[in-house]
Image: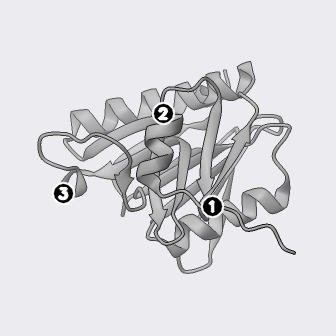
Amino acid sequence: MTEQRTLLTAEEFFRLYSSKDGDFELVKGEVVEMAPPGWDHGETAANIASALRTFARRHNLGRVVVETGFRLTSQPDTVRGHDVAFVRRERVPVGGMRGFFSGAPDLAVEVVSPSDTASDMEQKVQEYLRNGTQRVWVVYPDSRRIEVYSPDGTSRGYREDTAIQDEELLPGFSLELREIFN
């Protein structure tokens, strides 16, 4: 006999796991527990979030959030918690919201941890892009670089001595990578 698993919805996942300690995501209805990130990971994510948030607020472009759940798919539900995410102003719910954002962020930032495999990262990048994310930044603290992926299948690499820019998504934004990795 095969064992039948009960898949959770995003609402059930939120109710059962939002108050638990630890990092969890919902992937095709199944809960995935992840190790908490290390210091370099957290500091890098905070530096990126701070720069993006300051810029987005100053130019009224949208909202920047950290470790926030986004419901990417339904039936079965997938909820991913990006390290940093940006949502354009016109997509931010008026009056705020409770629970997970319904849909993908415009920008998803994933800071690679030692426990992340290349195939895990590739799967996440493709999942984000397939479900409406316009850019995915995969940040490699150890090698001090960022790879930026777009829905058209292209990618562009940035090294520590360059600045990351995206005139389409964040007009006027420029961030020196050395500021992220310090």
Cβ–Cβ below 8 Å for labels 2 and 3? no
* Residue 171 can be seen in this image: no
Whichever of labels 1 and 2 marks the residue nearer the N terminus, that label is 1
Whichever of labels 1 and 3 marks the residue nearer the N terminus, that label is 1
* Left/right of residue 10 with respect to residue 54 in the rendered view: right
Picture quarter containing residue 140? top right
- On the image, numbered disc 3 is attached to which residue? 90
Above or below for 38 versus 109: above
Depth check, mark 2 against mark 3: the one in front is: 2
Picture quarter containing residue 15? top left
* Left/right of residue 38 with respect to residue 104 in the rendered view: right
* Left/right of residue 162 with respect to residue 89 in the rendered view: right
Which colour assignment does the render follow?
one colour
Cβ–Cβ below 8 Å for labels 1 and 2? no
Locate the N terminus by quadrant: bottom right
What amino acid does circle 1 point to? Thr
Give the structural element (helix, strand or loop) at label 2.
loop
- On the image, numbered disc 2 is attached to which residue? 18
What amino acid does circle 3 point to? Glu
Depth check, mark 1 against mark 3: the one in front is: 1
Whichever of labels 2 and 3 marks the residue nearer the N terminus, that label is 2
Residue depicted at x 18% and y 57%: 90
Residue depicted at x 63% and y 70%: 126
List x then y, in percent, for residue 141.
75, 35
- CA gap, disc 1 to disc 2? 19 Å
Locate the C terminus by quadrant: top right
Picture quarter containing residue 129? bottom right
List x then y, in percent, for residue 16.
51, 38
